[in-house]
Every structure is written in C-alpha cells, then in structure tokens.
Image (cartoon, helix red, strand yellow):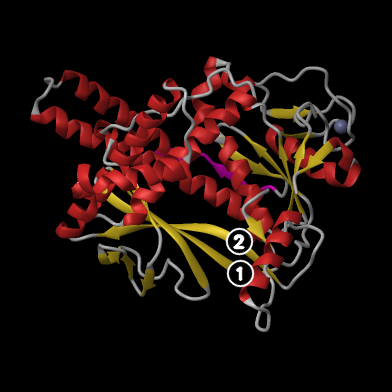
C-alpha cells in the first residue's frame, strides 16, 4: 500500500534531515516502526461556486491543459517515429523554449497547469508501458483529448490557500465554495488542486498531506462482509446495505433520455439540450453510487471498528464474462468498494483480510462447518442438511468470512 508514510515529531530536527528520515521511513512502508502520528495523503472533493469571470478562467485553463496534453502526446509519437528518446523534463524544456513565440496565449494561464499536463501525459505513458510489461491484452495507448468529451479539468500547484468557505487559486483568485466547512484549514499541507467540470458544475479536488493520530486498533469482533447485487453488502453482524433504489430510477430516466436524444435532429438545439440532460443524469447516478459505496466502507471500518474486516476476493473479471450479471456488477463496483475498505481500514486501525478466491463462503454452513456440494443462485435461504440450520444465504456467507479470522488465517491472505 503506497501513498502514506509515518510522520515524525519534528521540532528540533533540521528540515532537510527530517526529510531524509521520512524518506527512509516511507521506504519501509509502515508496519514495523511505531510513531505517534501517521502521515497520510488524501483528497477532498467539493463543489465550487465560481462567478462568470472565474468560469471563463476555468474554461481557459482546462483548454490549455488539454492543449498541452495533446501537444505532448503528438510530440511523443513523432519522437518515437523519428527514433528519438524523450521524457517529461526534455519535453517540458523544449516546449518552454518555444511557447512564447508559438503559443503566446499560454502566458495568460498559471504555469503549474502546463507542468501538470506534461506530468499527466508522462504518467499515462508509464501506465501504458507497465500494462505492456504485465502482458495486458489491451494495454490502452494514451488517447488525444477532445472538447467533445467535455470541458475536462486542470491541475494547479503552488500558492493555494483555503479559508472559511473559499479557496484561493493561482491566477484565478478567491473562489467561493458551495460547502462551507468541508475543506480542512488547519494542520494540512496542500499539495495540489484539480479543478474539473461535470454536467455544468465545477469541482475542486484538493490533495492534502496531513498528520492523523495513529489509530487505535479496532477492538470489535471480526466482521465478514459479503458483497451482493440486490443487497450491496451483508455484514456478519446482521447489518445490511441495500443498493439504492434511486440508482434504478436514474437508469430508467437515462434510458428514456437516450431514446429522446436519438430522435433529435443532428446539429439541432434540442439535441444539445438533451445531451446536457443526459450528462446531468449520468453525474447523478455516479453520485448516488459513490455515496452508497462510501456509506458501506465507512460503516464497516470507522463506525463498527472491528479488529478485522474480511472481504471476498471476487473474481470480478470472471463474473463480468457472464453477461447476465455484467451490468449489475459494473453498477455496484465491488472493486472500488474493496479499495475503499482497504484504505479506510488503514486509517481507522482495522485489519483488512481478503479470503482466498476459492474459499466456499456461500456453500459452507456457518453453524457446523459442513460444505454443500451444490448451491443454486436462486436459493436465497441456506438450509444445512447436517445440523438443520436455516439462515439467510448472504448472512451465512458473511458469518463464514468473519470466522476465517479465528479459524484459519492462512486460508486468507493479509492485505496490510
Ligand atoms: Zn450445519
């Protein structure tokens, strides 16, 4: 698990020395050393309330970000074809040398936006090569960005300040926030801000580095969590999280809008209007889904504070191949849920364990431990032939997962 290091009380130590120590600690990647504070990187995303002038500046910055990204991508392709090597620094240097002459309008935007766009392309390239190395079927070569896909986003660094209800961005100035007390103002180091547009609304995702007190290890009983399609998550303590109904409603609405879109005349104004409505509907569905996932991951870690959370290692790829289930599974995004449980578990002192892929959590009786040879998906109740126990299928699976911690930890692989 990257992305964090253990902080150190640093009053007397010289800054440079401190950085060195931190680097060493970060390398050890937690676990062995115990200090009073834990340093984490996290992002806070919140909606902005820009005025018209700022909206214009946002569009301009997003445009520059897109332009640089595309320029850098085209340049990399050209260099490759010419048999020359390039990298982030070389590219950026060459661009800076010619930008005043060729692209003088770039001067109107913050410099760090240019830098970040080059960095993003570099990361996209690195990810591409990493996927090739791993032997991915579709390594996904970086794509050119188009205005048609949306206004997009831009990233800034440097002189960023957060005040009650507003945020100060370089070149743009103070921008009001829709939510007043969400962004932290004290005890943080702001690393960067990404400003993005979605369905006509603007958002800022603020990356911060902060010290949080080393969490006290969870004391509660181990908690098993079974992921499902109708019920999003079934916990072994009996708590259930239904998939929000609003999701299905939103999808019906989306389908209707898409039909409406198909009827509209190409290039017409009404087509544009429907397009905006569709974007809005998409954003809303995504938000409902996100909210549901965060709700579950927060509950099973911070709220219940068990000593360990056991989740299944879902073979998501294998399940996606099954067409019937594919959509539903994409919907609830189990992978994202697991990711959230993992990092939140880390923050709140809860161990997260993944059960082995072939552990029969649904087929085992949580009462006596006998394993059924066959269990149909349609059987919602688990009936044990040996001890006669009747229990909800998902609750049974969750209980089995929880008992993995006590019985045989070696069957699961630890994720910390
Ligand atoms: Zn039994």
Q: Magenta span has 239?
A: yes
Instruction: Please tell me which residue lies in front, 302 or 244.
Output: 302
Contact? badges 2 and 1 (CB < 8 Å): yes
Callout 2 environment at 10 Å: few (<14), some (14 to 19), or many (20+)?
Answer: some
Which label was assigned to residue 66?
A: none
Horizontal side, residue 209 vs residue 18: left or right: left
Q: Could you tell me residue 35's position as x and y percent?
A: 75, 70
Q: Residue at x 56, y 59 (%)?
A: 41
Residue at image mark 2: 40
For label 2, the SS is strand
Q: Is residue 416 above or below residue 382?
A: below
Answer with the quarter of the image where residue 288 lies. top left
For label 1, the SS is strand
3D distance between C-alphas at marks 2 and 1: 6 Å
Q: Residue at x 70, y 29 (%)?
A: 381
Q: Could you tell me residue 17's position as x and y percent?
A: 68, 72
Q: Is residue 391 above or below residue 158?
A: above
Q: Quadrant of ligand 1?
A: top right
Q: Is residue 99 visible?
A: yes
């Amino acid at each position: 698990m990257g992305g964090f290091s253990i902080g150190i009380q640093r009053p007397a130590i010289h800054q440079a020395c401190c950085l060195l120590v931190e680097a060493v600690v970060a390398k050890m990647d937690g676990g062995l050393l115990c200090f009073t504070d834990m340093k984490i990187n996290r992002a806070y995303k919140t909606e902005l309330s820009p005025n018209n002038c700022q909206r214009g500046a946002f569009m301009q910055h997003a445009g520059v970000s897109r332009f640089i990204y595309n320029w850098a991508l085209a340049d990399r392709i050209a260099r490759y074809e010419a048999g020359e090597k390039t990298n982030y620094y070389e590219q950026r240097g060459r661009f800076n040398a010619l930008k005043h002459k060729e692209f003088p309008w770039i001067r109107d935007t913050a410099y760090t936006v240019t830098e970040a766009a080059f960095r993003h392309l570099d990361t996209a390239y690195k990810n591409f090569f990493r996927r090739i190395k791993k032997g991915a079927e579709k390594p996904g070569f970086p794509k050119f960005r188009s205005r048609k896909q949306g206004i997009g986003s831009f990233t800034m660094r440097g002189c960023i300040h957060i005040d009650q209800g507003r945020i100060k961005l370089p070149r743009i100035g103070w921008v009001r926030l829709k939510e007043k007390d969400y962004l932290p103002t004290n005890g943080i180091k702001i690393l960067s801000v990404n400003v993005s547009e979605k369905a006509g609304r603007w958002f800022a995702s603020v990356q911060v580095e902060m010290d949080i007190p080393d969490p006290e290890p969870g004391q509660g009983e181990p908690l098993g969590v079974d992921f499902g399609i109708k019920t999003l998550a079934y916990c072994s303590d009996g708590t259930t999280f239904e998939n929000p109904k609003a999701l299905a409603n939103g999808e019906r609405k989306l389908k209707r809008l898409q039909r409406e879109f198909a009827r509209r005349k190409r290039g017409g104004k009404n087509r544009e209007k429907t397009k905006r409505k569709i974007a809005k509907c998409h954003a809303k569905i995504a938000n409902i889904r996100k909210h549901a996932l965060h709700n579950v991951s927060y509950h099973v870690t911070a709220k219940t504070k068990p000593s360990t959370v056991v989740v299944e290692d879902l073979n998501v790829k294998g399940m996606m191949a099954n067409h019937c289930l594919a959509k539903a599974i994409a919907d609830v995004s189990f992978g994202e849920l697991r990711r959230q449980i993992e990092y939140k578990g880390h923050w709140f002192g809860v161990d997260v364990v993944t059960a082995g892929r072939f552990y029969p959590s649904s087929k085992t009786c949580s009462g006596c431990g006998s394993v059924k040879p066959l269990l149909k998906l349609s059987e919602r109740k688990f009936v044990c032939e040996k001890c006669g126990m009747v229990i909800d299928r998902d609750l049974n699976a969750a209980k089995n997962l929880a008992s993995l911690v006590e019985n045989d930890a070696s069957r699961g692989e630890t994720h910390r």
